[in-house]
Image: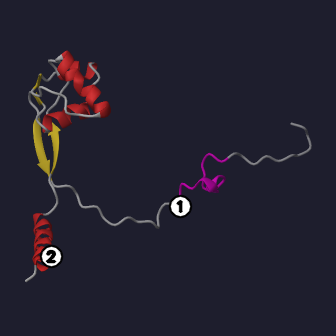
Amino acid sequence: MTDEANTEVAVEEEKEAVKDKGPKMKKKVSGVSKESKLTVIATENNKRGASAARFQAYLDKKPATVQEALDAGLTMGDIHYDHIHGSIDVEGAVVEEYEPKARGPRDDTAGDAGDAGDAGDAGDAEAEPEVTDDGEGF
């Protein structure tokens, strides 16, 4: 068997292994309240962009609670992400893994209801009343 054939076989075996693993498990955090104590584990900021600016608040302001972190400009999404990835520890927080739901095929046939060209449909509850001129001037 040639090297090229061996490579093709290896690629196919790897594809089959990935199929057998199933969907990647997702993670979510529960048990976080604004009063929860927060401990910063990270010693340096490895983030980029806007998240790096927010993450710097952990290192500069050393918040002791989730509320102090929020007041420093972090978001609850930042706190959840950083807890899952081990940059911080939040007292009482639990990381749960779950299997993502399979998405069905997209239904492109439904969706004409909100088109901009439908102003004045008979079924429109907020349609303007019909104006008639009865010649009386008011």
> What amino acid is labelled 2 in the image?
Glu
Q: Where does the C terminus fall, quadrant-wise?
A: top right
Q: Quadrant of residue 78?
A: top left
Relative vertical location of residue 41 with respect to residue 103 in this rendering, above or below: above
Q: Nearer the viewer, residue 25 or 7?
A: 7
> What amino acid is labelled 1 in the image?
Asp
- Scheme of image coloration: secondary structure
Say few, some or many: other residues with alpha carbon within 10 Å of mark 2 (under 14 / 14 to 19 / 20 or more). few
**Horizontal and vertical percent for residue 121?**
64, 56
Relative vertical location of residue 118 with respect to residue 67 in this rendering, above or below: below
Is residue 114 rendered magenta in the image? yes
Q: Nearer the viewer, residue 26 or 44?
A: 44
| SS for callout 1 | loop
Furthest-front residue in this view? 2
Contact flag, marks 1 and 2 (Cβ < 8 Å): no
Is residue 120 rendered magenta in the image? yes
- Residue underneath mark 1: 112
**Horizontal and vertical percent for residue 52?**
26, 30
Say few, some or many: other residues with alpha carbon within 10 Å of mark 1 (under 14 / 14 to 19 / 20 or more). few
Q: Which numbered circle lies on residue 8?
A: 2
Q: Quadrant of residue 45?
A: top left
The segment highlighted magenta reads 113-127
Relative vertical location of residue 68 with respect to residue 100 in this rendering, above or below: above
Relative vertical location of residue 113 with respect to residue 30 in this rendering, above or below: below
